[in-house]
Image (cartoon, helix red, strand yellow):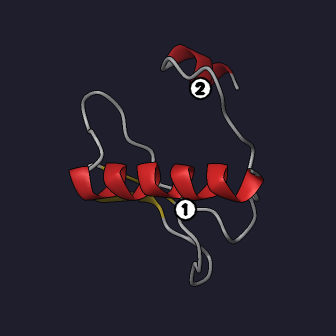
Amino acid sequence: AEMMKKIGCVEAMNLDGGASRALAHNGSIIMKAGRPLTNVLIVYDKLHPAPQSTIQSWEQFQKTDEQAEN
């Protein structure tokens, strides 16, 4: 939690830290997963912005989610 605060995060989530965990940064694997991963969480920031196609996909998902609530 303290590391996330230090890098400017205002919201964070704690995920499974067992064999499912791995960490990569700037194309380098820092911590290899202990087993094949089926889900991946990708974090973008000001220095490493998301591709436009990812932003558009997220915006479309948000619209679909809002429509489902109504």
Give the left or right position of residue 23, taking residue 64 as reference.
left
User: Is the residue marked by circle 1 packed among few (<14), some (14-19), or many (20+) residues within 10 Å?
Assistant: some
Residue nearer the viewer, 34 or 52: 52
Using the image, determine if residue 63 lies above or below residue 40.
above
Give the left or right position of residue 6, taking residue 42 as reference.
right
x and y percentages locating residue 25 in the rendered image: 35, 49
Give the residue drawn at x 55%, y 50%. 62
Residue nearer the viewer, 44 or 27: 44
Looking at the rendering, which quadrant does residue 47 occupy? top left
Instruction: Identify the amino acid type marked 2.
Output: Met
Instruction: Identify the amino acid type marked 1.
Output: Ala
Q: Which residue is mark 1?
A: 22
- Looking at marks 2 and 1 on the same chain, the residue that comes earlier in the sequence is marked by 2
Give the residue drawn at x 56%, y 71%. 33
Question: What is the secondary structure assignment of the residue under circle 2?
Answer: helix
Give the left or right position of residue 31, taking residue 50 as reference.
right
Give the residue drawn at x 54%, y 62%. 22
Which numbered dot is residue 4? 2
Looking at the rendering, which quadrant does residue 1 occupy? top right
